[in-house]
Amino acid sequence: MNGLFISFEGIDGAGKSTHIAALAQAFEAQGRAVTLTREPGGTPLAETLRAMVLNEPMDALTESLLVFAARRDHIGRVIAPALAQGRVVVCDRFSDATFAYQGAGREFDWDVLHTLERWVQGPSAAALANGTAPKLLQPDLTLWFDLPATVAAQRLAGARVPDKFEAQPAAFFEKVSAGYARRLREDPARFARIDANQGPDGVWMEVLAALRAKGLLP
Ligand code: TMP
């Protein structure tokens, strides 16, 4: 059975978490083995880098290098082996988040991010030699939870002590949303835009519809 890679994206407060868990259960109910993971994170090293990125002030290039370093470790130790075993990998954020947060939100150079993406998600030299991995590792499907920044801010208010990104004003998240929209335009076949500005039942129906439209769930 082929591995399957699904990512969830959206601004902070978009409400991904419950649906990530529900989708993992839906695949398990189909008899699939699921790896549930997140970025930045998913390995001990990547979780250490996550704590730095979320808590320490740094410039946008440093942030980008750290999240891509975390991603490199995560791919090598968790994502690629799980896909090779035919597992379903459900990942809370992947490289679209770097383009959206560092690229659009912090206005860091989009082309440099593309270069880092090729380094980190490109085929290994061995795979290139075999001709077995011609393209970048990307999710088979990315569910983008789209929600107005003002609504997300209301949902987040008072929910927990905000980290560095959650503490940003709505204007920052409007830029992040524009970054996600740009990523969708660059690779529309990979994305499903989910209207997250509705109740959880409606959101879940849209998630299921996106999976079914791709033939990934019955
Ligand atoms: P989370 O709270 O959804 O787990 O995400 C962690 C935070 O890190 C979130 O505010 C988005 C941010 N982030 C980046 O800035 N760049 C990235 O590449 C990733 C994966 C997350």
Image: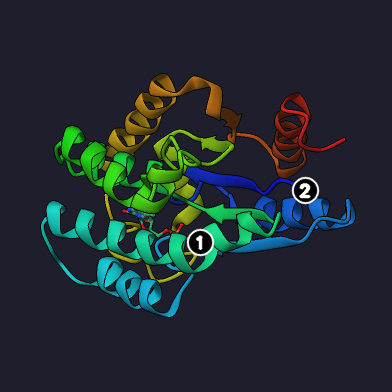
Determine the secondary structure under disc 2.
Answer: loop
Residue 112 as seen in the image, left or right of residue 177: left
Determine the secondary structure under disc 1.
Answer: strand
Residue 90 as seen in the image, left or right of residue 1: left
Residue drawn at (45%, 33%), measured in percent from left and top? Answer: 148
Location of mark 1 (residue): 38
Q: Is residue 99 above or below residue 120?
A: above
Q: Position of residue 30 (x, y in %)?
A: 88, 51
Amino acid type shown at disc 2: Met
Q: Position of residue 216 (x, y in %)?
A: 76, 36
Relative depth, front residue between 208 and 137: 137
Residue drawn at (14%, 59%), measured in percent from left and top? Answer: 62
Alpha-carbon span between mark 1 and mark 2: 23 Å
Asked if disc 1 and disc 2 are in contact, CB closer than 8 Å, the reply is no
Residue drawn at (60%, 31%), measured in percent from left and top? Answer: 194
Q: Which mark is residue 197?
A: none
Disc 2: CA contacts within 10 A as few (<14), some (14-19) or many (>=20): few
Taking the view exactly as shown, the residue that stands out farthest to the left is 59
Location of mark 2 (residue): 1
Amino acid type shown at disc 1: Arg
Taking the view exactly as shown, the residue that stands out farthest to the front is 130
Q: Earlier in the sequence, mark 1 or mark 2?
A: 2
Q: Position of residue 200 (x, y in %)?
A: 71, 44
Q: Is mark 1 within 8 Å of ligand 1?
A: yes
Residue 107 as seen in the image, left or right of residue 129: left
Q: Is residue 18 above or below residue 117?
A: below
